[in-house]
Image: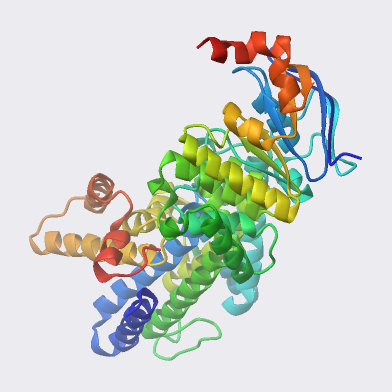
Amino acid sequence: MSPQRRAYVLLAIIAAALIVLPFVSGSYVLSVATLILFFAFTGQAWNVMMGFAGQLSLGHSLYVGLGAYVAAGLFFHYGIGPWAGVWLAIAVCVAAGAAIGFLAFRFGISGVYFALLTIAFAEFTRIGFDHIDWLGGPAGLFIKVEQRDSWDLLNLRGTPVMFYFVMLALTAGAFAFCSWLLRSRAGYYWQAIRENEDAAQALGINTFRWKMLAVVISAAMTGVSGVFFAFYYNNLFPEQIFHISRSIEIILGPIIGGLGTLFGPILGAVVLTVLADGITELMALAGIEIPGVKQVFYGVCLLVVIMFLPHGIWPTIARRLGLKER
Amino acid sequence: MALLEVRNIGKSFRGLRAVDGVSFDVEQGAIAAMIGPNGAGKTTCFNMIAGVFAPDAGSVRLGGRDITGRRPHEVCRAGIGRTFQVVKPFPQMSVLDNVVVGALNAHARVADAKREAVRLVELLHLGAKAGELAASLTLPERKRLEVARAMATRPTLLLLDEVMAGLRPTEVDEMVGMFRGINRETGLTILLIEHVMRAVMALAARVVVLHHGERICEGSPEEVVRDSAVLECYLGEEAAG
């Protein structure tokens, strides 16, 4: 079988398993699966910027938070549903991403300094939102929980199974979108910029424009995951959603799974969420409760991968399965 | 009117005049060479033409259009393809994809760019390595990749910065033959910086000699190698060695 055929077969198996899952699993497994998909989707979004275009963002919580607050605010105050709200959420995230990208790329801020800039924006937004009373400030914004037993897709109110399928659709959509991006002009140009910006420019690539596009697409996708977050958890606190630990959580999956690959963010999300939740559960069963175990576990995972699989888990597995590494 | 007209370009780095008032022309369809000792300002000249640095003074015109101080990607769009003396491959992309990136400058569709890239990869004898990562190439192969990528942008003027360095004499002859063939068949204008005199003598119709950032001589290869100033500052060393 050609690598492409094998990839399609693998995809079909995964898709079938994911569709059947909610009908055979309990509510706990379903919530873990939803969380995995959430991180797979958000990781995919972050991967567009870092994995494809080589621009390190350590402040992606900014877009999760902005997306979440915009959609939740509209719903809370005006009863505007998430399918309408998501567009404004995307617009706000695109504007924020464009502002950061413009500042950085116009004035030649790159590498570590670019990463610092992204942290700075996320941090002052977090502090700023503490002072927006309209969105609840530090006390948080709560969406009324209702109709939990039936599906109301229009307002994104319903059972955990509904949320699971919404997140599954988003993740599948993001996968297809990113795989298309990677094969398009943008994919080639982003990788060229990631690999060597001087050479990219010499080949006629307006690196400013294409880096901006990467940031804007990544921000928009992350904003969508924020909207989901708001309606899934029903409560938002600036202190949590904009926090740097959320940004780190987002980027760990793609790094561990395989930067710049399509399966990496998904695989990374599975490994991290399943193992991290598993360990927490096991410890709880054993009657041990130490705060921060999850974070220590993340750190260990990162160390192991960087030491033994510097390109992430996916490229190694792909080679074993005879698939393309990307 | 010459294709490339360089007029009095100059560039200083922290008070050091790397290039000082250099002028020369490259005729449409010609192959010209720029030679000179290390540190003479050859690569700085290239970088000013290719838009990496804006010249402090002077102008660069391509096909009559002023391109002085344009940024590298604009210069590429205007029709100048360049290679880097210190090669800059995209290491984690395949050899073919490296060339596809260049070809996308001249092709609207990715499929067309791929076809063109396949052709160029074959032309530069990289066909056997097309699917491998550029990181796996040897230095001579990387030099050829630089050429393939620059040619893929479909330039009217190709700037080659020491692409023969480190090649064996037979490989030099092969590359010379290839550039000659391309120049004859497509009329592509070529300006090269080169230390390998074997290649310069065989390829170039005109030679510009730089020394200490200034043009000290210009003429046919035969004239240049007889010039006393050139012998003293550059070729003399080689002859003595």
Which quarter of the figure is the N terminus of chain A placed in? bottom left
Is B238 on the left or on the right of A320, as rendered? Answer: right
A56, B147: nearer the viewer = B147
Up-down: is B107 above or below B220? below
The residue drawn where x is 58% and y is 51% is B148
Measured as percent of width and height from the top left, residue B231 is found at: 66, 12
Is A302 on the left or on the right of A124, as rendered? Answer: left
Which quarter of the figure is the C terminus of chain A placed in? bottom left
Up-down: is A36 above or below B83? below
Is B231 on the left or on the right of A192, as rendered? Answer: right
Measured as percent of width and height from the top left, residue B57 is found at: 83, 22
Residue A123 seen anywhere in this rendered image of the structure: no
B147, B204: nearer the viewer = B204
Is B21 on the left or on the right of A130, as rendered? Answer: right
Residue B23 seen anywhere in this rendered image of the structure: yes
Measured as percent of width and height from the top left, residue B10 is found at: 78, 20
Measured as percent of width and height from the top left, residue A89 is found at: 61, 66
The residue drawn where x is 46% and y is 45% is B141
The residue drawn where x is 67% and y is 35% is B192
Up-down: is B199 above or below B131? above
